[in-house]
Image (cartoon, grey):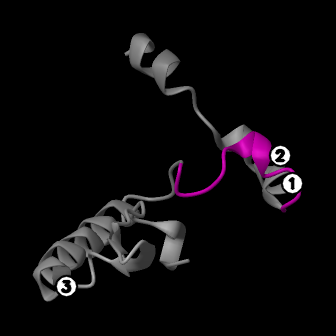
Amino acid sequence: MTRFDGPPRVVALGYVLKSGKLEGPVDMFDDPAFDYARRVAGELTDHIRRMGPFEPHRLPDQEMEYTTLPVVMEKLKDRFVDIEKETVAK
């Protein structure tokens, strides 16, 4: 796994049938031609991550029950503001 489990993984596995035998897999992306695309994907991922945590950056709240997140969320619940209600009030 990589940092933050992102960007989404895409694989290209190549196989060849040779003399009646299936050979491979070969990583079709193991080519310098894809280095630029990998670098750009990493930069875009860094940019998105700087915007703060969001799903699927992490599991949804309801799936974080075995972590400390529910305790933290309970402590902070009075600080949250319903954005939709606040926008309508203005």
What amino acid type is highlighted by mark number 3?
Asp
**Rendered image quadrant of residue 33:** bottom left
Q: Residues within 10 Å of mark 3 (few under 14, many from 20)?
A: few
What amino acid type is highlighted by mark number 1?
Val
Tag nearer the camera, 1 or 3:
3
The residue beneath circle 3 is 31
Q: Residue at x 52, y 57 (%)?
A: 57
- Foreground pick, 42 / 65: 42
- Residue 37 versus residue 81 in the image, above or below: below
- Foreground pick, 51 / 8: 8
Q: Residue at x 86, y 54 (%)?
A: 71
Answer with mark 1 or mark 3, whichever residue precedes in sequence. Answer: 3
Relative placement, left or right, of 64 versus 82 is right
What amino acid type is highlighted by mark number 2?
Glu
Tag nearer the camera, 3 or 2:
3
Q: Residue at x 53, y 50 (%)?
A: 56
**Rendered image quadrant of residue 6:** bottom left
Q: Quadrant of the C terminus?
A: top left
Give the numbered dot on residue 74.
2
Q: Secondary structure at mark 2?
A: helix
Q: Residues within 10 Å of mark 1 (few under 14, many from 20)?
A: few
Percent coordinates x, y for residue 70 in the rendering: 83, 50
Callout 2 touching callout 1 (CB < 8 Å): yes
The secondary structure that most of the magenta stretch takes on is loop
Q: Secondary structure at mark 3?
A: loop
Is residue 63 on the magenta stretch? yes
Q: Spatial distance from mark 3 to mark 2, Cα to Cα?
A: 49 Å
Q: Which residues are magenta?
A: 56-67
The residue beneath circle 1 is 71
